[in-house]
Image (cartoon, rainbow, N blue to C red):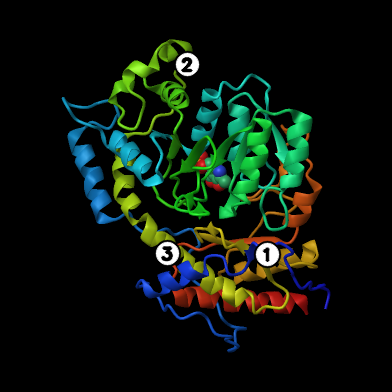
Amino acid sequence: MEAKVRVRSSGNSEFNRDGGRQAFRRASHAGSTGNAEPPDNDHRETASLTFSGSFTQQEAIPDEAIDAAVEVMRSGRLHRYNVVANELSETALLEKEFAAMAGRRFCLAVCTGGYAITCALRALDLLPGETVLTNAFTLAPVPGAIVAAGGLPALVESDEDLRIDLDDLQGKMERASARILVLSHMRGHICDMDRLMELCDRSGVTVVEDCAHTMGAAWSDTWSGNHGSVACYSTQTYKHVNSGEGGLLTTDDADLMAKAIVLSGSYMLFGRHAAAPAAAEFGAIPYGYPNCSGRMDNLRAAILRPQLRRLERNCAEWLLRYRTVEQGLELIDAVQTIPRSQREAFVGSSIQFRLPGFSSAMVSRVVRDASARGVELKWFGSEQAEGYTSRSDHWRYIPERDCPKTKDALSCLLDMRLPLTFSIADCRTIVAIVRDVVNRTAG
Ligand SMILES: Cc1ncc(COP(=O)(O)O)c(C=O)c1O
């Protein structure tokens, strides 16, 4: 056997495999579409098993949302500021409802999650070439959003549990004397937010939370996005609500929100927002900040509003699938799952696992053989950037991009989407195929 299998023991008692178990039990009893029993140690013959489901197939847009979208089209008023007397646009209503859901004073809907990050940085008066700290393990739009705002990404290592390395962060905060951290909760893994905020508050670093993968998640009962000064969510198809493209920015900071609204392209129509500071509070901001067009339209807002009402239920369904797959993966000797904190209520819309000791050739073989049997695994550690995956050293526009610890953590890390179109039985089939492929590769 080529693989050196390491038994994991997390020294940090906060991080263990029980995180979210209670929620899992709640979800199990909440009436899932699939079989709610946790998986057993199913050792049936799997050599010929294949899977035909699509890892990129999200649920259909609910009828209620389709009806609302058709209504907008019938009205012809798709632009967010195109309203009749006393009308609040679908976009303004979305902002109002999302702000209430998140427990934030203000919300702005924009064209993408990446734009929301860029807009937040511009609203924080980022200077040209200013250093912005961010996780080395994130998706390409995050450093891209920093560069789009004129900043220079300074990459902070991630640990093997896929969270930002707080010791590296502390060192880099001191050395780079940076003012802003874009904290990416990549793949929904939330770091110790109490410690992170203590570090950032002590150093006067403003935290912009990238919540593209944590809409509906929480840390210590605080909604993900409410720890930092501003949070950015994505409503792109593969996220937790789906409008094709879209982004939401939330904050309690009136000055920041006024700037963000003007920057997003409000013209002088900022009075038509419903989760914003009063028009009188905008003062000279509309004259001092450029219109960097990035608005959301009423069609997408109409599609999103009914989906917000389903978010909590969907999060429970994702968790059920996640725990089913996780429990199955834990029975595979060569596989290491990622520990979750008891303080983290995460959204299990994807799962990551490691194959410690597997060479690159072995990981590549697992990906190829699983794919041949219909199971789509993504390898963030691959030498070549592929599909949506890339490593920090692939971002050649960043002068200092090498993060050896993160690269090492990603070298044997695999990632799998868990769309709600999968049943619990599907999840078990997928695990059986992964088990077979991994065991055959391990030899
Ligand atoms: C971690 C992360 N942050 C930000 C984004 C940007 O979101 P959007 O595609 O809406 O621009 C993505 C998109 O996939 C992402 O995965």
Q: Earlier in the sequence, mark 3 or mark 2?
A: 2
Which numbered circle lies on residue 290?
2
Give the Cα separation between the discs numbered 1 and 2.
Answer: 48 Å
Q: Which secondary structure lies at badge 3?
A: helix
Q: Is mark 1 within 8 Å of ligand 1?
A: no
Task: Determine if residue 30 is in view.
Answer: yes
- Measuring from the top left, give residue 212's x and y in whole percent: 51, 46
Residue 46 picture location, percent across and down: 60, 84
Which residue does the numbered mark 3 point to in the structure image? 316
The numbered dot on residue 13 is 1
Residue 5 percent across, percent down from the top left: 79, 73
Instruction: Give, as a three-letter code, the residue at label 3.
Output: Ala
Q: Amino acid at mark 1?
A: Ser
- Frontmost of labels 1 and 3 is 1
Question: Which element is circle 2 on?
Answer: loop
- Of residues 196 and 114, the one nearer the viewer is 196
